[in-house]
Amino acid sequence: MSYWLSIVVATPAHSNVAGALTYRSEWPLAPGCLVRVPLGRREVLGVVWQALPDSGGLPEAQARAVLGALDGLAPLSDTWRRLVAFTASYYQRSIGEAALAALPPQLRELSTLQLARRLKRPAATETLPPETTTDLTALSAEQARALTELDADTRPALLFGATGSGKTEVYLRAAAQVLASDASAQVLVMVPEINLTPQLQARFEARFAHLGKAQVVAMHSGLTPAQRLKSWLAAHAGQARLVLGTRMAIFASLPNLRLIVVDEEHDPSYKQQEGARYSARDLAVYRASIEKACRVLLGSATPSLESWQATETGRYQRLSMHERIGGAAQAGSLPAVRLVDMNHQPKHATIAPPLLDAISQRIARGEQSLIFLNRRGYAPVLACHDCGWKSECPHCSAYRVFHKIDRTLRCHHCGFTERVPRACPSCGNIDIAPMGKGTERLEEHITELLAGVTRPGGEPLRIARIDADTTRLKGALESQLASVHAGEVDVLVGTQMIAKGHDFRHITLVAAINPDSALFSSDFRAPERLFGLLMQAAGRAGRDAERGATSEMWVQTFHPQHPLFAALKKHDYPAFAAQELKEREAAGMSPFGFSALVRAEAREQAVAQGFLNAAAAAAQAQQLPGADAVTPYPAVPMTIQRVANIERAQMLVESPSRAALQRFLAAWQPLLHQTRQEGDFKSLIRWAIDVDPLAI
Ligand code: ADP
Ligand code: ZN
Ligand code: ZN
């Protein structure tokens, strides 16, 4: 007797094998079982999606049979499959692609036998005595209130807490409570970038050490495939009680999930940028809604405007913590914000004289300063003043950045690297010069400006730089951060990498050198990101309560009157949010409107744009469902139009209704596929839909 099953395998959305495939099996297999099946000439991993009543007309002789089941593993839960199905449909990809991408890669490669061996190894479940609560710090009044309020509600919760207000302690307590209430309960804690948050991981591990090592696991791309599989299996089997991970962890199989924490919920890294371009934050909210008795707790000092608006309308619960731990007694425990009007500073000054004075004074007092800039490298471009040549990348519509340390010109988009030419490649002038400043040049410049300034003991000062270039080697970031924590560094220069999350104790001055470009960006989320970044950066100053009162955040700007800075001066996120939301509402932008981008890549820009416009015209002609509430805009080149010799174009599709946009996209997909098959567009390299894109 044969059983008929629909099974999903990894097929990209754009291949013609889109949905689930029908297979025959000698044994009954429950939905959620992992199986190995033939696909073409290969043998691949599949997930049983549902049992079918019959072959659906497929002749028995043509049906392919399941080769084996990974029967040491319990089937993936209904909820997990719902999460995957939702992801596929919402983000316009195939279920197979979404499902298989959600599993650890090694699972795909292991044979049934190898897996069986791995499963047999018993996990070390030492049960240590539960942690006693007496040695824990007492909660602040605001923390206690947040936890009580959280307990009394069931909606998704947003913990709106100033930097240093002790959000992590709230996560820890909420997690501890869930774990204590039910011996099988599981908690998922998501962080934006695990490499930037070793401190958080350490805190969770320390707090839940009593659960035993096997019960707290990490899930992120920094793990080896074997470690990832191990964590995944522990979570799937219910042994891991607490999973700490990056966005991919939202798909962990957690049969008894009771709480999802999303730390720094506004962080753009929660959005996947390839394949199914999901938002792990949004999926966390969805997942909590379909799990049995699961809460979701989002946290941020500068929430995404989407989440903030949801608390305004009451869809989410808002928990507020305004005061920094230990800083409540002092007036103004958040750093004072000083705007430097660059219109009144010496021309071409990178660091305004008053800021330089302030930094020198900190050094003399033995305090640290942090200066950040959004550009790594020495100088953004190298230019010839005779003929106007600039260090353009031959493969991209972008300039290559001058890295002085190894005298190279490096493209930050395609990676193309060359030694700096001795003379201008276009006119032979040997006097080619750097233009603008990156972190490397800023470090050098500051070193010159501060020559002669010494530490309190008279020793020479130390300047350090942290950015993607200085932290390429494994462990480099940790050791550099350690020397900052140890007080060995007086001035820290870096990119926004250092402005986020780190718990620096001795920094009392933070300076943003050149934040203006985000004020007038074509990307409507740029002000939100800038405000969040500056608030985050301000949060790095004066984390030590004793120094909180004298700490400062300096911002150099040509637009000191901008309302964004007015809100920043008062550390007033709600005022900023109210102002931004008003503008977004008037413009029908997120969260008041919904959008998707369709991107296309080709050797020629005309092909990429032509494809998008032709597909939009076909949608128009066919009156697709939802089309009356959806506006497609004409295709345009992407901001960085060419990368690695590939031309890129995009089309924005907007709607005031999420449902209409979803209906429209689902109906449009087959038309996009069809358009691609037509004469002119066969040369298209790829296209993809990005739903709820972060940058437009
Ligand atoms: P946030 O994540 O909100 O920026 P943290 O959770 O990092 O803040 O807390 C800031 C600092 O305050 C940390 O060093 C933390 O250990 C400490 N802290 C948190 N809660 C308490 C408390 N109730 N009592 C004493 N210290 C606390
Ligand atoms: Zn020249
Ligand atoms: Zn390039």
Image (cartoon, rainbow, N blue to C red):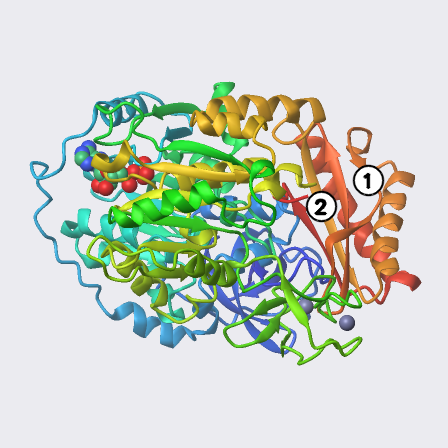
From the viewer's perspective, is 426 left or right of 459? Answer: right
Mark 2 beta carbon near ligand 3 (under 8 Å) = no
Residue at the (44%, 39%) spot, across then down: 554
Residue 18 location, x and y as percent?
68, 57
Task: Look at 24% across and 25% down and name the residue there.
Answer: 330
The amino acid sitting under disc 1 is Tyr
- Kindly give the residue lying farthest to the top in the view shown: 313
250 and 370: which is toward the camera: 370
The location of residue 392, given as percent across then percent down, is 72, 67
Residue drawn at point x = 74 percent, y = 35 percent? 654
Q: Where is mark 2, residue-wise?
A: 597
Drawn side of residue 246 relative to residue 695, left or right: left
Q: Residues within 10 Å of mark 2 (few under 14, many from 20)?
A: many
Residue 256 seen in render:
no
Is 428 placed left or right of 560 in the picture? right
Q: Are marks 2 and 1 in contact (CB under 8 Å)?
A: no
Residue 253, compared with residue 295, is above or below; it is below
The secondary structure type at the circle numbered 2 is strand
Corner quadrant of residue 337: top left
Q: What's the amino acid at mark 2? A: Leu
Of the numbered discs 2 and 1, the one sitting upstream in the chain is: 2
Observer-nearest residue: 114 or 573? 573
Q: Position of residue 537 (x, y in %)?
A: 41, 42
Residue 633, numbered circle? 1
Can residue 436 be seen here? The reply is yes
Label 1: how many Cα within 10 Å (few below 14, some 14–19, many 20+): some
The image position of residue 257, as x and y in percent, is: 34, 42
Distance (Cα) linking label 2 and label 1? 10 Å
